[in-house]
Image (spheres, coloured by chain):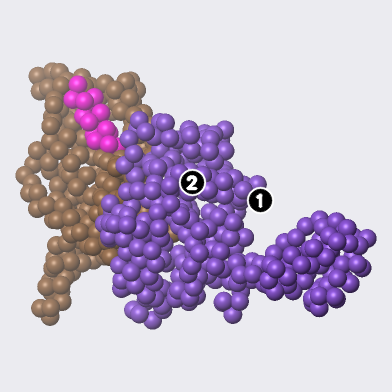
Chain colours: A purple, B brown
Amino acid sequence: MPAIESIGLSKYYPRGKVQALSDFSVNVEKGTIFSLLGPNGAGKTTLFRLLLGIAVPTKGEGRILGTHISDPKARQKVGYLSEDHRFPGYLNGEQFLYYYGKMSGISDHDLKRRIPDLLKKVKLDERKNLKLRKYSKGMLQRLGTAQALINDPEIIFLDEPTDGIDPIGRIEIREILLDLKNSGKTIFINSHLLSEVERISDDIAILKQGVLIRKGKTSDFLESTGRYQICVEKSKNGQVSEIFRKFSIENIQTAGGFSAAISCPEKLNEIIDEIRKERILIENIEQLKNSLEDYFIKVLK
Amino acid sequence: MNGLFRLTIKELLSKKIIITVFILATIFCLTLMFALNIRIGGIDSKVILNLFGNQVNGDTNMPSAEKILGYIQTGIAGTVFFISLFIALFATSGLFPDMLKKGNIDLILSKPLSRDNIFYQRFSGALAVVAATVLYLIAFSWIILSVKFGIWNFRYLFSGLIILVFFFNIFALMTLIALFVRSGVVSLLLTYFIVFILAPIIGTIAQFGVLNDSFYKNSVSILHFMLPKVNETLVLLSNIIMSQEFTLGSIWISLISGVIAVWISLVIFKRSDF
């Protein structure tokens, strides 16, 4: 049984004039990180809202852990961090986790144990008594992440989880997400930060104007460019240029070394042998791949 | 699963206006307790009222102790009625619009709660706070006045329930409006407009029968029947406390109107996308 099933989910506003999401079908397997990509207005947040019962689908159906999305029980094992969260400023961090934990049906006994752990995990344990109106955006985002984990969910929906968080905070959130994945949780992410998505996602779906245009494993999106970056000791660059000429390899010399169009690993090995025969020190060899950003821009164009 | 009910109470208490009413109510009751002195004596059981040591009433044509107590209790009940109409309604006006704001409602709906449950927890949280405030003031002042006068007027306690039913009616109406306009201030103003301007106008038209067309006549009659009636409720409060003849018709109508408004609000809330 997949963690999340979407079968032809569609949403039209208002009275069918605007297509927010059209016939979206996808299965998200348990224990994976699935990322939704797309420009603004692509339908990513709409999909989240349909799956979480925040909006009602015009067509199609969805299931979470086998339970139909119209049934509140489907959200029993779900955690959610929304994009534009508006947390009550009159509560402090600890109270916020308590009240929203109660809404998830968690007992006082469990909350007493989980709240300090979660506050520590998101590094807000020393600010637990501060009113939320005094929290920075990054702190609210981290608290929102803790809130999404308060019921020890099986599936976590995160809408722009690293939005407003500094680079160190992002690394911390990424580590939390990878930990969760390793403990068997399913994570469904909607993010604009393609580099973050590329690092952590198992599967990716790309939406454009409400329509699913690509889905697959993250590695499928990171295509090889057919080029290698070869870096040698700088004083021997002339000799290496000669070797490329001898093999009729098109190459460009960059700050990071030679970017050479090498068709296959066999050819690469022949070139390496030749370079080593000349006793030239190879400092680094890297296969050049398209980044997710390159792929994303290409697909959307 | 009652987290939203408790959060609603916490939210109202954080606004301080309810706490202020509690404090003022306590000060008022303590003033009654310590400053009001009543002496009943003489052949005709004459009542002498002293406030801070000064005699309040003259010696001639004094009404009976029951009547004086009734006047005081009617005055307090009327004040509590207007507190519920103005301060409590003002304090609760933002509850639904705030909950419906993007980023807040998303999070609440993502919890394993049905929409009925969310609506009822929010609504009953507000009612619970107002009920606690009204009943506190009525019950506290009832005990003090009863001890001072030596007369235990249980009808005064009943007036607290009447005030709560009326508040339920107008709060339900405000909630219904709030689901359309999604603004606390606008829903409050529209509710006041309906209660203080529209309802009296409709009442006057219905009373004097100025309409000839049967469709308009019937529409006005139905509206007059359904809309909250401030005047009639105040008269009812007074009649109950003063042990005069009364009918509970207007309060039953308030209750039914409130239930209908809650039901329509719930249908709208359940069908809305957020």
Q: Mark 2 falls within which chain? A: A
- Where residue A216 sits: x, y (%)? 48, 67
B32 vs A207, left or right, is left
Q: Type of residue at label 2? A: Asn
**Residue A183 among magenta residues:** no
The image quadrant of residue A11 is bottom left
Q: Residue at x 75, y 60 (%)?
A: A285
Crowdedness near tag 1: few (<14), some (14–19) or many (≥20) residues, C-alpha within 10 Å: few
A201 vs B201, left or right, is right
From the image, give the main secondary structure of the stretch colored magenta.
helix
Q: Residue at x 10, y 23 (%)?
A: B44
Look at the picture and state if B35 lies above or below A269: above
The disc label shown at residue A167, or none: 1
A132 vs B196, left or right, is right
- Where residue B212 sits: x, y (%)? 12, 79
Residue pointed to by mark 2: A182
Q: Mark 1 falls within which chain? A: A
Labels 1 and 2 within one chain: yes
Specify start and end residues of the magenta stretch as a single range. B132-147
Q: Residue at x 40, y 38 (%)?
A: A98
- Where residue A107 sits: x, y (%)? 32, 35
Look at the picture and state if B211 lies above or below B33: below
Quarter holding the N terminus of chain B is top left
- Where residue B69 sits: x, y (%)? 18, 31
- Whether residue B18 is visible, yes or no, is yes
> SS for tag 1?
helix
